[in-house]
Image (cartoon, grey):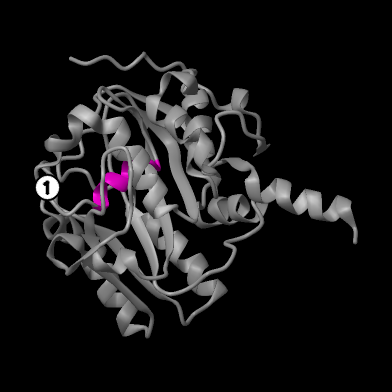
Amino acid sequence: MDYDRVDLRISKLNSVALVKHTQVIRSTLEEGINLIGGFGNLISPVLVKPNLCTIKDGTGATVTDIEVVKAIIGLLLQENEKLSIRIIETDSQSKYVQEAFDFFGYTEYCKEMRQKGADVATLDQSNTPLAKIQFDGKYFKNPELPEILSRPHYFISVATAKTHYLSYITGVLKNLFGVLPRKDMAVYHSKIHEVIADLARMLKPNLNIVDARVGVEDWNGPTTHQIGAFILGRDPVSVDSVMTKVFQLNPNDVPHLKKLEPYNLGSIDTEVIGIPIEDVSVKFSIPKVP
């Protein structure tokens, strides 16, 4: 056995790719995915979870850009044209998900993809059957989540780069909030770090992508920073830790990252491949409760 080759492959799988954005989103994402060794074992359904936290995007970078989702799906279908792909989201205090799917173009996009023969659709998880998940966490005890999450799947969290006054950062981990099937999300705010950590342990996303072309201070601004990069990796703790370092903030100050380190979901101190963090880092203000 060539142990050097095995070690290199493992290193790529556990690393975070930081890639400078080119003029073409798809080629930038393809570069990052190649740096971490590809998609890995793709199975249907592939669940793509963008951050659609509000209809009123006050910064132009608060919600996931549909062009990023289109590029990811294009790369998935390039890998396997027979994949079944679902773009998932739930209602929240700032939006109804079906309204968001319509407003941001997902409904029309999926219609066009189906006309081309691709099995791509939106899934409003606020109006789908629920199933009990066997899980004993710090916050959740055998919760009921959308039934599709209880069956084998491949999960992609697609976030934007933001800080947050409650969760300190909002990246690929905070994005998992969007699977919770209730509109009054504020019920979770007092234990937000425990909720995020439990969701990560239950869902274990297979691929994590942060669109860090623009960074946003607080969940909907108004302050923004030009960063010009994408962050990709298999381990959500590692990806969000790199994002936090890009903000020139300390991942050790983010409680849910510290809580998740023992659970094989990545590391605060992880190898970065691609470009150095220093090439794109921008000073963010420390998040504070208003």
> Where does the C terminus fall, quadrant-wise?
top left
Relative to the observer, which residue lies in front, 127 or 25?
A: 127
| Res. 252 visible in picture | yes
Residue 281 vertical placement versus 209 (above, below): above
Position of 13 compared to 240: left or right? right
Q: Magenta segment, which residues?
A: 172-179
* Residue at the image point whose x is 14% and y is 46% from the top: 92
Secondary structure of the residue carrying numbered label 1: loop
| Res. 68 visible in picture | no
Relative to the observer, which residue lies in front, 252 or 12?
A: 252
Q: Give the main secondary structure of the magenta stretch.
A: helix
When asked about the image quadrant of residue 113, the answer is bottom left
Does the magenta-highlighted stretch encompass residue 175?
A: yes
* Residue at the image point whose x is 37% and y is 85% from the top: 117
Residue 165 place in picture, x, y as percent? 26, 22
Position of 126 compared to 88: left or right? left
Position of 119 compared to 97: left or right? right
* Residue at the image point whose x is 18% and y is 36% from the top: 188
* Residue at the image point whose x is 31% and y is 34% from the top: 194
Q: Amino acid at mark 1?
A: Lys
> Where does the N terminus fall, quadrant-wise?
bottom right
Residue 138 vertical placement versus 222 (above, below): below
Position of 205 compared to 2: left or right? left
Residue 178 place in picture, x, y as percent? 25, 49
Residue 151 place in picture, x, y as percent? 36, 70
Find disc 1 in the rendering and name its residue.
Answer: 95
Does the magenta-highlighted stretch encompass residue 261?
A: no
When asked about the image quadrant of residue 274, the answer is top right
Residue 223 place in picture, x, y as percent? 29, 22
Relative to the observer, which residue lies in front, 264 or 180?
A: 264
